[in-house]
Structures are given as structure tokens and as C-alpha cells.
Amino acid sequence: MRVLIIEDELPARAKLEDMLKRLDPKTTVVAHLGSVKDTLHWLTSNEHPDLAFVDIQLSDDHSFEIFRRHPVNFPVIFTTAYDKYLLESFEFNSIDYLLKPITQERLKLSLDKIKNLEKHFLQGNLIKLIHADRPKNRIVGKKGTEYIALEVDDAAYFFTEHKIVFVRDFSGRQLILDKTLTEIEEKLDKEKFFRLNRKFIVQHKAIERFKPDSGKIRIFLRPEMKEEIHVSKETAPDFREWIGR
């Protein structure tokens, strides 16, 4: 496997390469890079690797800037001393998220995960799993100090309250999301989810019933929401078409 290491701390870079070689002597490290600028230059003039280990905080910027400025078609394992970037990492071909100091045991779990995904997605084409244009099939939210992965099909609806975005699943569990409703809407399957209004995006299965209400449509959800939810007169025709599919 051809591996790219993007890490600006030399000891961490050497330790990671040593652990990779111990776990798989056939691993080839194609380059060591320590900045966003150097990485962008390298990507424009070299064949992309099979996998990249990417430190989030580089010498000149966060490594997320690399992926915002250059198309990337290879899987990424982010490495960092902080857990606060976990949600954002899922937007950039992230297969895993390793907290420093990285242990050989934890690294092995990540590599095993890569191998298992390669078996499932033929020809090692992991990008089928993480391609940015496909509807999302998993979201990560926060409850207390924990991050929780939720299958999108288990999300009943997304909503905002006091400028915070939440997702509620069918069991009633509620998680905080680090995205706007518009950003979430762009990633969802439009056949399954509908933007009711500026506050709610709802899944088809979460609509218990609805009824006309002075030109608008009143929506009743499960799990139940205490506040009244309406679809506007302007949006009502689109809703009726969507719900009837």
C-alpha cells in the first residue's frame, strides 16, 4: 500500500512510519509533508496514494484547507491531539480519526478497517464509500461529551432551536450537530427527506399525519414535537407531491 504522511512534527512522523512498517512491511511511504502549501504542490504533480495519514494542525494552517482547495480521491485517516475536529473530519474522505499519541494497537484497528472496506468495495475502491456527491448514510452528533454515529435512516427529523441544530431519532434520542440545516439538507436523499420550513427537515417515515390549516399544512411528527409545525402555502404543493411518491 502506498501511503502519504502529512505531519509537521518529525518525531510523530517517524513513529508513525515505523509502526506502519512493523504492521505491514510492504507499506511504501511515498512522501512526508508538513504544510498545506507543500501538500497542495505535491498533489498537483504526483500520483495520488492509496491512503493518507493527515495531521489536522499543520505548520501553516489546518489540513482541511488541502481538501477544500484540491480534489482528493483517496481515503484519509486524520491524526490529532484534539477530539474537537471529529465532526468536520467526516466531510473530507475520513475513514478514521486517531487521537495522539497513536498506539500500534489502535493503528492496527484502522488498517484492519481499511482492509475490510476494500473487501466490501471491490478493487480497493474505497472512494465509493466516501464520495462527496452521494447522499450521506451516516451522521455524527454530540451528546454531552460523547460523539455518536447515527444512521441517516434512523433520523426522524432535524431541527433548530435557539440557533442550535439537533437531530432526533425514532427512539427520541436527541443529538447536537455541528452543521446548519442548509448544509445538512444538501447531503440528504431528497426522496426520503423534505425541508418543511426554515426550522425542520423531516423524514418520510416520521410524518404521523397532516391536515390542511388555513391554506397551510399542519404536520404531526413522531417522536412528537410539542410546538406546532406548518408547511407554508407556497411550499404546500411541493410537500403534497413529495409525500405522495
Image: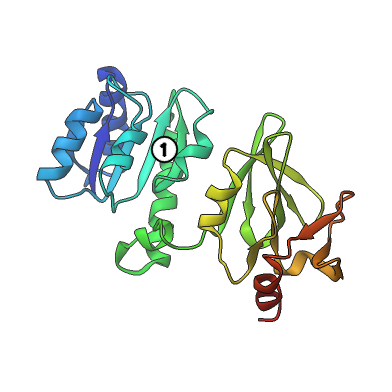
The x, y position of residue 45, in whole percent, is 9, 44
Residue kind at label 1, given as amino acid type: Leu
Q: Residue at x 39, y 58 (%)?
A: 131
Decide if residue 61 is on the left or right side of residue 43: right
Q: Residue at x 29, y 47 (%)?
A: 51
Decide if residue 68 is on the left or right side of residue 176: left
What residue is shown with label 1?
Answer: 107
Query: Tag 1: Cα neighbours inside 10 Å, few (<14), some, or many (≥20)?
Result: some
Snapshot colouring: rainbow
Q: Quadrant of residue 242?
A: bottom right
The x, y position of residue 114, in whole percent, is 39, 52
The x, y position of residue 103, in whole percent, is 44, 29
The image shows residue 240, relative to residue 133, as above or below, that is below
Decide if residue 143 is on the left or right side of residue 31: right
The x, y position of residue 100, in whole percent, is 44, 24
Between 50 and 91, the residue placed more toward the observer is 91
Q: Secondary structure at mark 1?
A: helix
Q: Residue at x 69, y 55 (%)?
A: 197
Between 232 and 226, the residue placed more toward the observer is 232
The image shows residue 86, relative to residue 242, as above or below, that is above
Between 100 and 162, the residue placed more toward the observer is 162
Q: Quadrant of residue 144?
A: top right
